[in-house]
Amino acid sequence: MKTLLAGALALLIGLPPRTTLAHDGPAIDEDKIIDLTHTFDEHAIAWPTARQYELEVVSAEHTPNGYWYAANNICLAEHSGTHLDAPLHFAHDAHDASEVPLSRLIGPAVVVDVRQQASQNADYRLTKADLLAWEKTHGRIPDGAIVLMLSGWGQFWLDRKRYLGSDAPGDAMNLHFPGFSAEAAEFLRSERVIDAIGVDTPSLDYGQSRDFIVHRIVSRVNMPGLENIAQLEKLPPAGAQLIALPMKIARGSGGPTRIIAILP
C-alpha cells in the first residue's frame, strides 16, 4: 500500500511517468489510472441555490517581452462539480474541509452498481439489501473502504435538467436523482468500518430529500462524502484504490476535489 500511495503521489505532484517516490517497489502503471473528476468549467453543476461557476480572464496574450502569459480568476461554490462534503456541512462540531484526514480519502473503492434500479426510478435510494448483495458476491466490505454508488447519472452531466431533475434557476424543490438510503448509511456507519461514501449524482441524499438524513448520519461520525464523481462505470466492483484530494479550505464545508482511482 505504501508503494501504491507513493506512486500515486508522484503522479499527482508531476514526477515523470512511471516513477515513484519509493525505491523498493514497482512504479505505478499509468494505464491503470482513471480520472473520476468532472472538468470545472461552465458546465460544472452546483446546487441550484448556489453560485454557479464563473471564470474571469485576467490575461491571455503575448506580452511586450515576447512571452505568453495567461491568468484567470475563478468563482465557484464549495459544493459544485466533483467535490468533497466535509462533515462540517451537516455537523457543527465536525471536521471542516481542511481537517478531514487524508486517511479517510484514500482507500479501497467499493462500487455498488444500482444502474438498473435507477433507470426505472430517478428517486432510487441505495439500500442495505444492495450492500448485502454486493457482499454476497465480493465478500465483506473491507475496513477503510470508500463505498461508492454507481447510478449511471454521470452520462447526464452535460444535461442539467436530466442530471438534476430541474434546470430552473434556484429550483431545489423539484430535483430527482438517486442517493443513499438512511438505512444503508446507518448500516455502513454502525456495522461496517468505512472511511467515506460517494455518489455519481449531486448529493448523498436523493433529490427529493427534505431532511438530508444521509448527510446527517455520516457527518456526525466525521465521515466525509464525495459527490458528482465521474466515470464510476470504469471501475470494477472491488479491487481499485481511490484517492481524493480536496482543496484544503479552512472552515470550509466542502471543496472542489480531484479524484482518481488506480485499477487492480
Image (cartoon, rainbow, N blue to C red):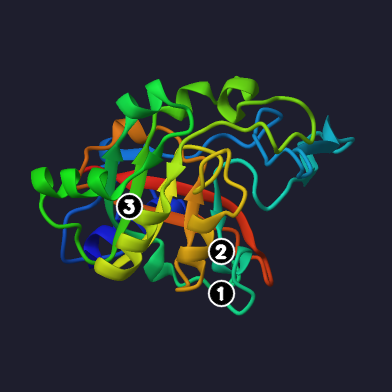
Query: Label 1's element?
Result: loop
Query: Label 3's element?
Result: strand
Q: Nearer the viewer, residue 157 or 8?
A: 157
Residue 174 spot, x, y in % from top left? 66, 31
**Residue 165 left/right relative to 106:** right
Residue 150, located in which quarter of the rendered image?
A: top left
* Mark 3, residue position: 147
Mark nearer the N terminus (3 vs 1): 1
Mark nearer the N terminus (3 vs 2): 2
Decide if residue 210 is in sight here: yes
Decide if residue 10 is in sight here: no
Quarter that holds the C terminus: top left
**Would you call the spot at circle 3 few (<14 residues within 10 Å), some (14-19), or many (20 or more)?**
many
Residue 119, located in which quarter of the rendered image?
A: top left
In the image, is residue 221 above or below residue 184?
below
**Residue 89 left/right relative to 129:** right
Quarter that holds the N terminus: bottom left
Residue 80 spot, x, y in % from top left? 65, 44
* Mark 1, residue position: 95
* Mark 2, residue position: 86
**Would you call the spot at circle 1 few (<14 residues within 10 Å), some (14-19), or many (20 or more)?**
many
Residue 141 spot, x, y in % from top left? 20, 57
Q: CA distance from mark 2 to mark 1?
A: 6 Å
Q: Please report contact status of discs 3 and 2: CB closer than 8 Å, yes or no.
A: no
Residue at position x 76%, y 26% from top? Answer: 168
Q: CA distance from mark 3 to mark 2?
A: 16 Å
Q: Please report contact status of discs 2 and 1: CB closer than 8 Å, yes or no.
A: yes
Q: Nearer the viewer, residue 81 or 21?
A: 81
